[in-house]
Image: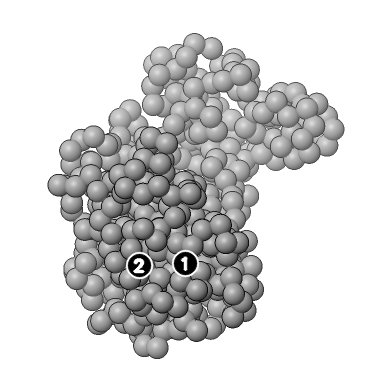
Amino acid sequence: MAPQTRPDRPAPDSDSASWWAALQDGNLMVNMCQACDRASLYARPFCPHCWSEDVELVPATGRARLYTWSVVHQNAAPFADRTPYVVAMVDLSEGPRIMTAIEGCDAKDLTPDMELEAAFRTDDDGFAVPVFRPVLR
Amino acid sequence: MPTNQVAIVGVGLSDCGRVPDKTATALMAQSARRAVADSGLSKDDVNGLGAHGSLLAPVEVSEYLGLRPTWVDSTNVGGSSWEVMAQHAAAAISSGEIDVALLTYGSTARSDVKRQVRSSAAAMSTGGALQFEAPYGATLIAKYAMAARRHMIEYGTTVDQLAEVAVAAHDWAVMNDNAFEQQRLTLADVASAPTVADPFTTKHVCLRTDGGGAVVLAGERVARNCAKEPVWIIGSASATSHVSMSEWSDFTTSAAAVSGPPAFAKAGVTPSDIDVCQLYDSFTSTVLLTVEDLGFCEKGTGGPFIGSGALRPGGALPTNTDGGGLAACHPGMRGMFLMVEAVRQLRGECGPRQVDDARLACVHAMGGFFSHSATMILGRH
């Protein structure tokens, strides 16, 4: 992946480059440990639970539950253009918790532990940002 | 008392609030000179130094002060760095490695923003662990706001109960001439302030001031001959949590739940014995989690506990008696000010805001985004 310089873009490294690259292809991955059978994130070249190096990135289901969130009303550029927006912590069905944005839903309709599914927001620079949306019933 | 007992024997604050005409290092030096003078010791007695800086810190600060210490520390875990350095210094003193340690802090965070040499929004890294948060615009305030919301979800804590932390802080501040804020605040004032990251309005967020502080630590032999009554460090402990919000397993419980119990156990006291608290108040909700995690009330009952007015002057748990980071002074790493105010309360030097017969104080500092916790129990003997 090309180096990113915007404040809203990650600076991938040798631990994370393949995780970000998979996201650009629409795949949210978790770091799966073959030794202890537990998933982890963020991507590391070992398992933070048992320290085994027998890990591999595998696709997640994309299903998650909303743990908590905040509606951000004030921030500097480039985020200022998007306020108000929802920052959230969600728990993937595989176990790991991640920070994300909730989109496709009015903030007042968010409820604790609601079911979510992964989506990908492609920004004007072509970068795909993993976000989550409510599961439609 | 064991012979290796260590005390805080000197405290000092630099000019605080708006200090556009001094550098951060000058504020470190000013508070250091005041703290050493307060102790009755002299510059030549200091052989340990703890400070932050930019170039080979703390050597840079030693040089500026004209000191050549044989023990240095520059631990950086955010606002609780000073409590950790105090723990380290106490260990070095009790082992006989050094006699007197000086810890000093200074920051021109407010003036730097005015001078536009610092951004008002803390620029977070987009590399390392924080790269995974980079796309989402999670401000420091939003991170704390998410933790506050989870407490509201699990325990029914209300925004007004959180706001009471700010109201109590301002009630204390009006009794402290050195506090940045000199006006009382109501729950309605907090609620009607602009929303930054919900559920937080600007009044749930600490100040950004200039300021510095310093403490002088010494062992029993030196402390007995100091100018003021020594304030003994009778228990202390630290704990580490996370830098990635995703690595925090329970947003309603901080590392204070780990650092608190051993600090109280070493001191041989319980939360109900404490006369006065200085608890890091980066945000209103920081105090909420802290009073629960340290055992001043049961987990989940911090809202009603604070809502009862416990933290206010005359309350069950007088807390942040200088006005705290919400109303007195917050230049970025407030942990130093917690120790200074605790010592002044235990010495009975606090004038109109003095807590009657304060004999035992609990200091609790927090660093980062609930990333690190350090608890100290201080007492007169």
Tag 2 residue: B41
On residue B15, which mark appears? none
Label 1 – label 2 distance at C-alpha: 10 Å
Chain ID for label 2? B
Position of B331 compared to B157: left or right? left
Q: Residue A98 placed where, x, y %?
A: 58, 37
Secondary structure at numbered mark 2? loop
Secondary structure at numbered mark 1? strand
Above or below residue A48? Residue B238 is below
Q: Quadrant of residue B34?
A: bottom left
Residue B272 in view here: yes
Query: Between B46 and A31, which is closer to the camera in this rendering?
Result: B46
The residue most toward the right is: A35
Q: Nearer the viewer, mark 1 or mark 2?
A: 2
Label 1: few (<14), some (14–19) or many (≥20) C-alpha neighbours in 10 Å: many
Question: What colouring does the structure picture have?
Answer: one colour
- Amino acid type for the residue under numbered disc 1: Ala
- Amino acid type for the residue under numbered disc 2: Leu
Position of B255 compared to B204: left or right? right
Q: Quadrant of residue A73?
A: top left
Position of A133 compared to B14: left or right? right
Q: Residue at x 42, y 36 (%)?
A: B56
Q: Residue at x 41, y 14 (%)?
A: A125
Residue B256 in view here: no
Q: Quadrant of residue A118?
A: top right
Tag 1 residue: B218
Q: Residue at x 21, y 67 (%)?
A: B178
**Marks 1 and 2 close (CB-CB < 8 Å):** yes
